[in-house]
Amino acid sequence: MGIYLNPGNDLFKECLNSKIYVDKSALIGELNQLLKTSGKFLCVSRPRRFGKTMAGAMISAYYSKGCDSAALFAPLKISGDKSFSEHLNKYNVIQFDINTFYKRTNGSLDMMNVITSTIVAELIQEFPAANIAPNDTLENAIIKAWGATGETFVIIMDEYDVLVREKVSKPLFDKYLDFLSSLFKNSTLKPAIALAYLTGILPIVRDKIQSKMNEFDEYSMLSARQFSEFTGFTEDEVRSLCAEYQMDFDECRRWYDGYRMSDTISVYSPKSMVTAMLSHEYAPYWTKTASYESLKLFILMDFEGIRADVVTMIGGGRVRVNVFKYLNTFTDFYSKDDVFTYLIHLGYLSYDRSAQECFIPNKEIRSEWINSIEDEADYKEIMEMVNGSRELLERTLQGDEEYVAAELDKAHTRATNPLTYNNEASFQSAIGLAYFYANAKYTVIKELPTGKGYADVAFVPYVPNIPAVIVELKNAKSAGSAIAQIKERKYDELLQHYRGDLLFVGINYSPDTKKHECKIEKVLMS
């Protein structure tokens, strides 16, 4: 065993020995179906701290020759897969992290030579009969080893995209492209590779790397397909952790859920989940692994409509995004669609593929968005709304109709584009911002379905001794008619299992005067 060639299973042992380990070994069963097929080249991207290192350690421990991993995998899901024994410890694994070599060489032009000479030295030692020379390229060394023994290789490359993210010099980047091309476009070498598994934060960069990696199938936050459940912790896995550590699942979901990988699979950040369980406290954890300045950089870009959409999403709304036209350059941005697509890949936004909409996934990430705009002049009025949202909620619960109406005058104007002032969805987003603090005590649901229609906004409490709230909006009518509609359509039936005070809040706004009228009625649920 070597450091990079057949590195063994020690790193995976550490993962298994961790206080919290969630079994993701079924991933190997999916990979086994791709071994030595046209689908054997994979580029799997996901945000930082979403388990890329653990997955790499597990894959290496399973395939790597020179070690016996049967006992490690025996208790895990993959042991029941029919392909388990067939491929266990049967391949020569080459595993390396591009970022490690980038840092080791300080990003010098010699970086690719260092990677090559380091791994070739281990190949020489492992395959003495293959006549590998110290000055051989990596692809030639692999070809010689394969030719002499017939043994095939699994290549695991982590942080393949680091040179893109670091925006390195063109000469270094060109050398890197040549390195990738020699490994993965060499027709002589391809039969020697049983599987290539590349990971990073970003998907394949089309205008620079795609031609060098067009053999690769891409799995990302936009479309992870059969790997969706392995992108993070699933809801069932989180429920089990919450039960084991006696943590409230509903609160956990509010904090960390929201990354929609498919219509049926939504995942949680592993970093956040593990830290929350071990600390027995819900707080922002994933966001502490990087500065919010990186998010701020993109939010403040001068693209038409970006501010309005940021306001909509911070208020709990969704915005349409075209993720398909973007070339994934990650250095050049031409529209807000480019920016939002980038932020989806970074984990700051989630993507609903069927609706083609993006949104802030959860409470943890929303706090990062607030941090990023807090001191920015362009968002000063928005922050005033956020900071005043506690007072607005308290005054609403007290039934102060005049105060609520006056604050909504400001919110509707500040948070809404003049062209969409009369759009109900825009006003709902404005209300979401105005009542931002309500997220600390309520689940805020827009267009909650009832037996006779949809309640515009409902605040369902998840802490005791506060009333639920149903909000109905009207345009150029009256607040009284909004209250009447709540009663007529029996919107309170959606809270039939709730016991406690209930507030009906009717809001009418005038498109001409931009003034709001508010009526609040308290009802005791029997």
Image: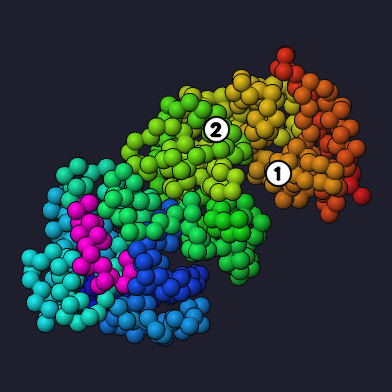
- The one of 102 and 334 positioned closer to us in this rendering: 334
Which one is earlier in the sequence, the residue at label 2 or at label 1? 2
Question: In the image, what residue occupies the spot 34% across and 63% down?
Answer: 41
The scheme the figure's colours follow is rainbow
Amino acid type shown at disc 1: Ile
Disc 2 and disc 1: Cα gap in Å?
19 Å
Q: Residue furthest top?
A: 513
Nearest the viewer among 125 and 144 is: 144
Q: Taking 368 as reference, is 500 left or right? A: right
Per the image, the residue denoted by label 2 is: 309
User: Height in image: 18 above or below 254?
Assistant: below
> Residue 497, image x and y in percent?
84, 54
Residue 500, image x, y percentages: 84, 48
Q: In this picture, is 396 found above or below 126? A: above
Q: Residue at x 34, y 46 (%)?
A: 206
In the picture shown, does residue 475 fall above or below 247? above
* Element type at mark 1: strand
Span shown in magenta? 176-196
Q: Residue at x 38, y 42 (%)?
A: 327
Q: Nearer the viewer, residue 77 or 412?
A: 77
List x then y, in percent, for residue 43: 37, 58
Label 1 sits on residue: 445
Q: Secondary structure at mark 2?
A: helix
- Membership of 64 in magenta stretch: no
Residue 359 visible here: no
